[in-house]
Amino acid sequence: MKITIIGSTGQLGTDLMKVLFGKHEIIGLTHKDLEVTDYNSCLILKREPPDIIINTAAFHKPDQCEDEPLKAFFVNAVGPRNIAAVSKEIEATVVFISTDYVFDGSKKEPYAEDDVPNPINTYGVSKLAGEFFTKQNPKHYIMRLSSLFGLAGASGKGGNFVETMITKAKKNEPLNVVNDMWMTPTYTKDAAKVIQEIIEKKLPFGIYHASNQGRCTWFQFAEEIFRLAGLNPTLNPIRTDQQQTKAHRPAFSVLKSTRLSKHGIQTREWKEALADYMFEKGHVGRTDLTKEMP
Ligand SMILES: NC(=O)c1ccc[n+]([C@@H]2O[C@H](COP(=O)([O-])OP(=O)(O)OC[C@H]3O[C@@H](n4cnc5c(N)ncnc54)[C@H](OP(=O)(O)O)[C@@H]3O)[C@@H](O)[C@H]2O)c1
């Protein structure tokens, strides 16, 4: 298949390029090559019409989205609208990457694909609008992911929660991390492999939840990072209401992949994925990973 990846140097985009390279004809488009908010720029997709377009582009910092709602809607909603329109015109399948933040977090048990979204911040509302626009192309996959970490780091600039924690710990900065917000950390390499399986097996179009398995709070995520890295910083659990952030965040956004299970696809536990990441990023040697997992 000919597959075009938008946002090819981003955290997920980089892993999609790696996972799909050599198996398909891949075209990677960076932000410089294509601006999703500009319809005319999106027409570049027609030059070498692909079978599949994967759109990873996003403005995904929730607090900044509160400050810049117009930008959030342009990138996360108008962008997917443009990509849906062009992909439909060239009869390509579109894959849109969405988020656990389309849910409000009040359910307290994992959200399935058919649970009703009710976003509580601008980022979530704009991504949900992006989902609706994506559906304008009937040949669509909407992949909801959560709390991503990947070797390239967000925006290809090396940053993600794991790296932030390790950097701060090495500077001996005391760390206050929320212990009442539940989610599933997800390795972009694993998410990329699920996307690969879905498109290769030509699964039915629609929404798929594709995070890693299990759940934890951000504090527990930090604890596991430090356990693997052999670091022992001052790590304090705090409540969400002790932290000043502009965007409200769902207190519980664990996703359940009912549609993937039906097709025999299962991702691994987040702790296993994190251990793999820590090795691949060079934070630990392979033998360190034999330390017994709690
Ligand atoms: N990060 C998370 O924790 C998380 C959680 C759930 C879902 N998601 C979703 O997963 C997807 C991938 O996230 P990620 O962490 O891989 O993000 P990322 O590293 O920031 O990658 C996004 C890529 O899109 C490009 N891009 C941004 N704005 C664009 C625009 N207007 N037009 C064209 N390209 C643009 C960026 O390029 P520049 O950096 O050069 O601008 C970057 O290469 C996003 O859709 C996000 O909403 C993320």
Image: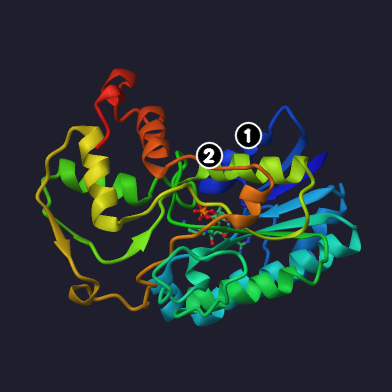
Q: Residue at x 75, y 52 (%)?
A: 53
| The CB of the residue at mark 2 lies under 8 Å from ligand 1 | no
Query: Regarding mark 1 in the picture, which secondary structure is present there?
Result: helix
168 sits left or right of 122 in the view = left
Find residue 32 and report its image quarter.
bottom right
Residue 255 picture location, percent across and down:
49, 60
Q: Which residue is mark 2?
A: 189
Whether residue 186 is visible to the viewer of this picture, yes or no, is yes
Q: Which residue is mark 1?
A: 19
- Verify CB contact (< 8 Å) between mark 1 and mark 2: yes
Q: Is residue 287 above or below residue 179?
A: above
Find residue 63 and report its image quarter.
bottom left
Residue 135 picture location, percent across and down:
76, 70
Q: Amino acid at mark 1?
A: Val
Residue 246 picture location, percent across and down:
33, 78
Residue, far top: 287
Dot 1 crowding, Cα within 10 Å, few <14, some 14–19, many 20+:
some
Query: Which quarter is ligand 1 in?
Result: bottom right
Q: CA distance from mark 1 to mark 2?
A: 8 Å
